[in-house]
Image (cartoon, helix red, strand yellow):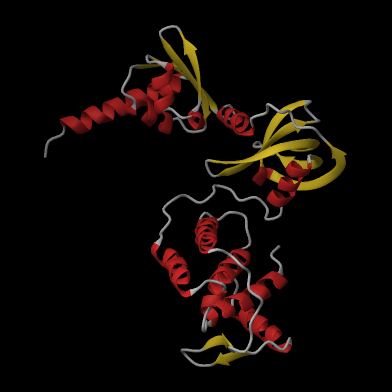
């Protein structure tokens, strides 16, 4: 749950950074309704903070110039970097309280001299993000809890719901966290299975820190482990394709996120799991070297269907 105190302080920060703001604008930024904004304004006024309200169609709230909060000190370069980072966090819908992002943006603007202030606001007005939001968002406090456990090398207890709906509980040593293809993952040692495992953070039901500490293997590559786990996740069709090319050329065309590449006589073998075969078929059609599908048969059938449709389209005349 988002903290009302955080939102209240964010309203104050927004009013500090702007000459005035309307109730609907504050509500939009904090993702609350206008009645809640009015309640926050009343609370600020009850605390002795001089917030003036102008009623009517063009009504707005403003903070009297006599009131100032102590500023945070950032260099101009730090302020621009913070602005870009906060904009990306907001637009990609990372699991962070919207009020916290707006409050940080307002604080950054408040301490800037005129020229970098205009640059920071220009960034907000000029940049448009065109990218998919995360496919699934974990509970807001799970990532900080997991991050602390990774940093402190502290064991946690997980209550987890698997892809098929089965629930289980286990002790887990989190070695790291990876954001990949719209999903957050954590990888580490599972004490239930006595082996390395990867878990989707949005499928975690509850987390409880333990007292026990752990040692992370020095040579463990959390990104590589997660990518390999995702490739062969349960419930996916297992794809095996022979590529008539060199390993170097295959790696240039097929990144690690799309599957594992293994050297073979005369070429390279691509392996991965896929919930949908259509995008695999499209990927294979784009490469400029010969490919041979070994499995599954459904992928070969899909490629034949696509070929027939392409021929039909090419032969049509209007």
Residue 41 picture location, percent across and down = 65, 84
In the image, taking residue 171 as reference, residue 230 lies left or right, namely: left
Residue 2 picture location, percent across and down = 69, 65
Q: Residue at x 52, y 84 (%)?
A: 20
- Kindly indicate the quadrant of the structure image that contains residue 218: top right
Q: Which quarter of the figure is the C terminus placed in?
A: top left
In front of the other: 89 or 315: 89
In the image, taking residue 263 as reference, residue 136 lies left or right, namely: right
215 to 26, vertically: above or below: above
Q: Is residue 139 visible?
A: yes
List the single residue furthest toward the top. Answer: 265
List the single residue furthest toward the bottom. Answer: 55
Q: Residue at x 40, y 26 (%)?
A: 252
Residue 211 picture location, percent across and down = 88, 43
List the single residue furthest toward the left. Answer: 318
List the single residue furthest toward the right. Answer: 211
In front of the other: 167 or 155: 155
164 to 238, vertically: above or below: below
Q: Which quarter of the figure is the N terminus placed in?
A: bottom right
In front of the other: 79 or 293: 79
- Kindly indicate the quadrant of the structure image that contains residue 288: top left
In the image, taking residue 75 as reference, residue 199 lies left or right, namely: right
147 to 10, vertically: above or below: above
- Kindly indicate the quadrant of the structure image that contains residue 126: bottom left
20 to 101, vertically: above or below: below
Q: How many marks?
A: 0
In front of the other: 216 or 196: 216
Residue 311 picture location, percent across and down = 22, 27
Q: Is residue 293 visible?
A: no
Q: Residue at x 60, y 34 (%)?
A: 223
């Amino acid at each position: 749950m988002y903290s009302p105190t955080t939102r209240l302080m964010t309203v104050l920060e927004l009013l500090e950074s702007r000459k005035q703001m309307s109730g609907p604008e504050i509500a939009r930024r904090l993702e609350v309704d206008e009645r809640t904004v009015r309640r926050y304004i009343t609370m600020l006024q009850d605390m002795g903070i001089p917030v003036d309200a102008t009623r009517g169609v063009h009504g707005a709230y403003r903070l009297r110039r006599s009131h100032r909060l102590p500023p945070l000190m950032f260099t101009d370069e730090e302020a621009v970097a913070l602005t870009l980072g906060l904009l990306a966090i907001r637009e990609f819908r990372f699991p962070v309280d919207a009020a916290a992002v707006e409050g940080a943006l307002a604080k950054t603007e408040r301490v800037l001299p005129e020229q970098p202030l205009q640059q920071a606001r220009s960034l907000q007005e000029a940049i448009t993000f065109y990218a998919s939001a995360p496919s699934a968002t974990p509970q807001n406090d799970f990532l900080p809890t997991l991050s602390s456990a990774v940093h402190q090398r502290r064991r946690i207890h997980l209550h987890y719901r698997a892809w098929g709906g089965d629930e289980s509980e286990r002790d887990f040593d989190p070695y790291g966290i990876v954001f990949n293809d719209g999903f957050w993952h954590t990888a580490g040692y599972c004490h239930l299975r006595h082996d390395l495992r990867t878990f989707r953070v949005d499928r975690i039901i509850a987390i409880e820190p333990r007292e026990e500490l752990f040692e992370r293997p020095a040579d463990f590559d959390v990104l590589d482990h997660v990518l390999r786990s995702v490739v062969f996740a349960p419930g996916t069709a297992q794809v095996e394709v022979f590529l008539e090319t060199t390993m170097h050329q295959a790696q240039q065309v097929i990144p690690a996120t799309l599957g594992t590449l293994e050297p073979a006589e005369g070429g390279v073998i691509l392996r991965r799991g896929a919930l949908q075969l259509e995008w695999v078929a499209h990927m294979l059609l784009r490469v400029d070297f010969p490919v041979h599908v070994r499995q599954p048969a459904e992928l070969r059938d899909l490629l034949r269907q696509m070929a027939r449709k392409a021929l039909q389209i090419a032969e049509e005349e209007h």
